[in-house]
Image (cartoon, rainbow, N blue to C red):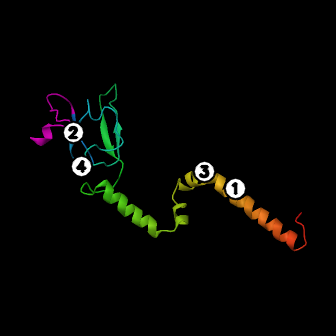
Amino acid sequence: MEEDKCKKCGRTYEEVELEPMPCCSSYLCWDYCLYEEPERCPICNTRIKVISKDGMTGEARVESICFGVPSEMSQEEFDRNLAEIMDESPASYLLTIPGVYEVVSEHFNNDVLGKWEREKREEEEEEEEEGGVKE
């Protein structure tokens, strides 16, 4: 039976401990395929988080990071739809999403400062042309 084998390496329940993936319901083995804690499911490419085995309890699990995404939807389909929605939204709207402003402002910090300096220089030049000097 297919559930009795690791979908990636083919090892069986008799050889290894198998874990059902929350994203695609395929079984993968802990010893070889989940040992390195991949960030994406090796079968369907959905983002996952591997919670390593607890030394005390022996518990381990895998969580899907894409909440609410149907297992029939591929990561490529999700990404395509997300990109289309983002293309339809103004960029300034993205800054209202928690955590986005901090990342974007840090990324563009030097560009923002450069733009501000150019604007200040242009204002000073305009005032000099008009005969006044800014104090």
Write down the residue under mark 2. 8
The answer to which of marks 2 and 4 sits earlier in the sequence is 2
Specify the amino acid type for callout 3.
Glu
Estimate the spatial distance between the alpha carbons at disc 3 and disc 2, rounded to whole Å.
40 Å
- Residue 113 is tagged as 1
Q: Secondary structure at mark 2?
A: loop
Whether residue 8 is in magenta: the answer is yes
Q: Nearer the viewer, mark 3 or mark 1?
A: 1
Write down the residue under mark 3. 106
56 w.r.t. 88: above or below: above
Q: Is residue 54 left or right of residue 125?
A: left
Q: Is residue 58 left or right of residue 127?
A: left
For residue 115, which quarter of the picture? bottom right
Q: Are marks 3 and 2 in contact (CB under 8 Å)?
A: no
In front: 129, or 101?
Answer: 129
Q: Secondary structure at mark 1?
A: helix
